[in-house]
Amino acid sequence: MKKRICIAQIAFRQNIASHINHIKEIISANRLADLIVFPELILHGHPSVERPEGLLYRRVVQYYRTMAADSSDLYSFIRAVDARVILGELKGKPGHFYNVATYIDRHQTSIYEKTHIHRTENFLPGKALRVFDTPLGKLGPLICFDGAFSEAWRVLALKGARVVVNISATPQSFPLSYIRRRLQGAALENQLFIIYVNRPGGYFSGHSGVIDPHGEIIVELDEAEDVFTCEIDLAGLDQWRAEEEIFPKRRPLLYRDILRSHSHCQLPQQENSSRRQRAADGSGLFISPQSAGAQVMPFHEAGREEF
């Protein structure tokens, strides 16, 4: 049971009409793939580069309004060509945004809101981990920093996901080796295919790829823009789960401590105070989307941050 995956490792283009047309061209050319995946916030730009978020959102909304009369918005286009697509976008209103992974096919539009918000971001956190029913089977979405939490991967696996898509905007300052280890470990421990789609080089690190349930990298791109198609074998996943019985051997009652507050894992008070001081004195900041006089948020303090 082989399925074809299209990785669209592309950058955001400032001209919105040109950018949306570029996305449509990729979708049209790869519409026979079982899934086409674009990076985090690809419809609006990422606030680490194109900011503030409110301006990004208004630009795209304005574009869609101008196209509404012709019913040629991106969602309608995806349905018309019978494609299956995951893309990253903003949803909400200025000052109250969700960072979203949207799945669109002919029959549905399903949304996952990023649940784990990095301290450098100014998004509202989503309230649930979700699994989408797709022609590929049950599919779990995660967005960038979500992938740092082993519990998120396991919950998606327990919800029936056999493929998890992690769309990202990881900067070059965050070590690529950490990303690889994290994804390979999550794939092996949860017996999943993982599709990682990151923004390409410049500010971001690219290196999108696909990892199999043994934790082996099937394909990995470099830093440049690229659109690449590969196959995954879901029958092989079923064989591995039957051979190495992780889920039937779980003992959830032994894991109850995970529900407790891990106060011993929190940062020392002195370091928390130091971060508050840096936020107060303006070192390492970016402006939130609320207004020119809005609050400031810490941004790339240590030079090794992941989004």
Image: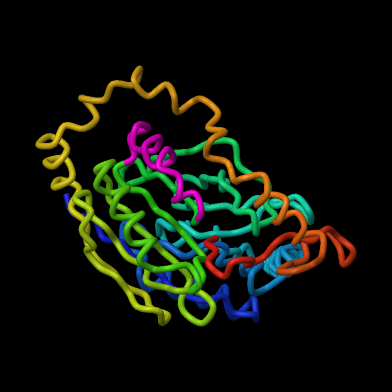
* Residue 69 is at least partly visible in this image: no
- Taking the view exactly as shown, the residue that stands out farthest to the right is 293
The picture quadrant where one finds residue 294 is: bottom right
Residue at screen point 45% across, 50% down: 148
Q: Is residue 42 left or right of residue 30?
A: right
Residue at 48% from the left image edge and 65% from the top image edge: 39
Percent x, y of residue 104: 48, 52
The answer, for residue 82, to whether it is visible in the render is yes
Q: At 42% across and 39% down in the image, what residue appears?
A: 131
Colour mode?
rainbow
Quadrant of residue 137 within the rendered picture: top left
Q: Which region is colored magenta?
A: 145-161
Q: Is residue 124 left or right of residue 279?
A: left
Helix, strand or loop for the magenta stretch, by majority: helix
Does residue 58 show up magenta in the picture? Answer: no
Q: Please name whichever residue, 17 or 175, is drawn nearer the observer in this view of the structure.
A: 175
Question: Percent from the top left, x then y, of residue 91?
Answer: 66, 53
Looking at the image, residue 240 sits to the left or right of residue 299; the answer is left
Q: Nearer the viewer, residue 141 or 82?
A: 141
Q: Residue 282 or 162: which is nearer the viewer?
A: 282
Quarter holding the C terminus?
Answer: bottom right
Please say if 39 is above or below 193: below
Residue 193: where, in percent of width, then height?
Answer: 27, 51
Q: Position of residue 274 (x, y in %)?
A: 71, 56
> Outermost residue, top direction?
253
Q: Say whether residue 13 is left or right of residue 149.
A: right
Q: Is residue 156 magenta?
A: yes
Q: How many marks?
A: 0
Q: For residue 257, which quarter of the picture? A: top left
